[in-house]
């Protein structure tokens, strides 16, 4: 039987099931992010200490924008907006507005073969750079070999707003040098020295990206909704329900970890419009990301 424990002092949720060898830890105060994950006895996501969450954004939900906004500024419907600059070294706004918010636990359910958790954050203030209100729900479903994350955003303001969405999980390999990522792409983004999108370039590949010892912070336009991460000990598949699919890959200064980030837009999307969508008042946008191991 799956069990869910809520540590009220740390505001952490832990999911466990001895039979399926599953363990998961969610940090409610860090945007409801998935900080640790063991599926079928295999460590998929580990604590990145000594790196801290404010540096890694580990497993954070990226909304209302994924990645960066150049100088934190953009124009929407004739009005100029200015986000706070939270990436000082590049003078960019980074990874949206909910990664550091405290979510509410709205629902937990367990049974013999799964556990489900629903978290919610309701933004009622007009944020700097984003003068709109919204409600965002995260539904995590855990089974022996999978974790499914459904993100649901409702525009609760009286005006249409722009957005992209992303997820920032880091996955552990026992040997990243001998691991690879399989995906279908023919275009790769070109960044400037501040990781701001400048354009695209053709990308030729047999579909298998060999990681080796590369230091990565790269993005591709996907032709499908599926990415595979192959390690010596497990094979992992990430799928997305989105029509707009981009893949951001980043190697942190932590051995054998790699961020494989599904997103619906790219860096500086509010200016270049690549992947940017709009959500009308009272409308809902849903995206589901599923991680499955073989």
Image (cartoon, grey):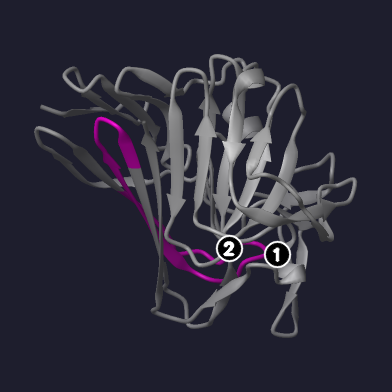
* Quadrant containing the C terminus in the rendered view: top left
Q: Could you say which quadrant of the image residue 255 lies in? A: top right
Spatial distance from mark 1 to mark 2, Cα to Cα?
A: 8 Å
Q: Mark 2 points at which residue?
A: 164
Q: Residue 291 in the image: x percent, y percent? A: 40, 40
Up/down of 284 relative to 225, above or below: below
> In the rendered view, does 118 fall on the left or right side of 197?
left
Name the foreground residue: 211 vs 119.
211
* Quadrant containing the N terminus in the rendered view: top left
> In the rendered view, does 52 fall on the left or right side of 93?
left
Q: Mark 1 points at which residue?
A: 269
Q: What residue sits 71% from the left and 23% below the top?
A: 212
Q: Tell me, yes or no, whether the highlighted magenta stretch contains residue 87.
A: no
Q: Could you say which quadrant of the image residue 174 lies in? A: top right
Sequence-first disc among 1 and 2: 2
Residue at the farthest front position: 206
Q: Residue 82 in the image: x percent, y percent? A: 75, 64
Q: Could you say which quadrant of the image residue 196 lies in? A: bottom right
Q: What residue sits 58% from the left and 63% below the top?
A: 164
Q: Residue 189 in the image: x percent, y percent? A: 77, 55
Give the residues in magenta. Answer: 119-147
Q: Residue 96 in the image: x percent, y percent? A: 61, 53
Up/down of 170 relative to 177, above or below: below
Q: What residue sits 56% from the left and 65% below the top?
A: 244
Can residue 102 be seen in this snapshot? yes
> In the rendered view, does 238 fall on the left or right side of 111?
right
Mark 2 and mark 1 in contact (Cβ < 8 Å)? yes
């Amino acid at each position: 039987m799956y069990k869910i424990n809520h540590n009220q002092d740390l505001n952490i949720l832990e999911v466990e099931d001895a039979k399926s060898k599953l363990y998961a830890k969610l940090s409610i105060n860090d945007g409801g992010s998935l900080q640790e994950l063991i599926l079928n006895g295999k460590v998929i996501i580990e604590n990145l200490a000594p790196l801290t969450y404010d540096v890694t954004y580990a497993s954070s939900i990226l909304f209302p924008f994924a990645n960066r906004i150049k100088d934190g500024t953009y124009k929407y419907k004739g009005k100029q907006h200015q986000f706070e600059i939270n990436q000082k070294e590049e003078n960019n706004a980074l990874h949206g507005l909910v990664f550091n918010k405290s979510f509410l636990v709205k629902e937990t359910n367990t049974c013999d073969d799964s556990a489900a958790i629903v978290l919610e954050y309701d933004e009622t203030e007009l944020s700097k750079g984003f003068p709109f209100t919204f409600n965002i729900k995260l539904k995590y479903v855990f089974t022996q070999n999978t974790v499914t994350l459904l993100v649901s955003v409702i525009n609760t303001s009286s005006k249409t707003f722009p957005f992209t969405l992303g997820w920032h999980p880091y996955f552990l390999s026992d040997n990243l040098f001998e691991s690879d990522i399989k995906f279908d792409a023919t275009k790769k983004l070109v960044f400037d020295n501040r990781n701001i999108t400048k354009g695209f370039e053709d990308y030729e590949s047999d579909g298998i990206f060999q990681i080796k010892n590369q230091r990565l912070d790269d993005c591709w336009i996907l032709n499908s909704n599926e990415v595979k991460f192959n390690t010596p000990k497990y094979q992992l598949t990430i799928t997305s329900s989105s029509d707009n699919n981009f893949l951001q890959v980043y190697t942190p200064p932590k051995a054998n970890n790699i961020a494989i980030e599904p997103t619906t837009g790219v860096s500086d999307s509010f200016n270049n419009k690549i992947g940017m969508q709009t959500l009308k008042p009272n409308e809902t946008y849903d995206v589901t990301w599923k991680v499955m191991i073989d």
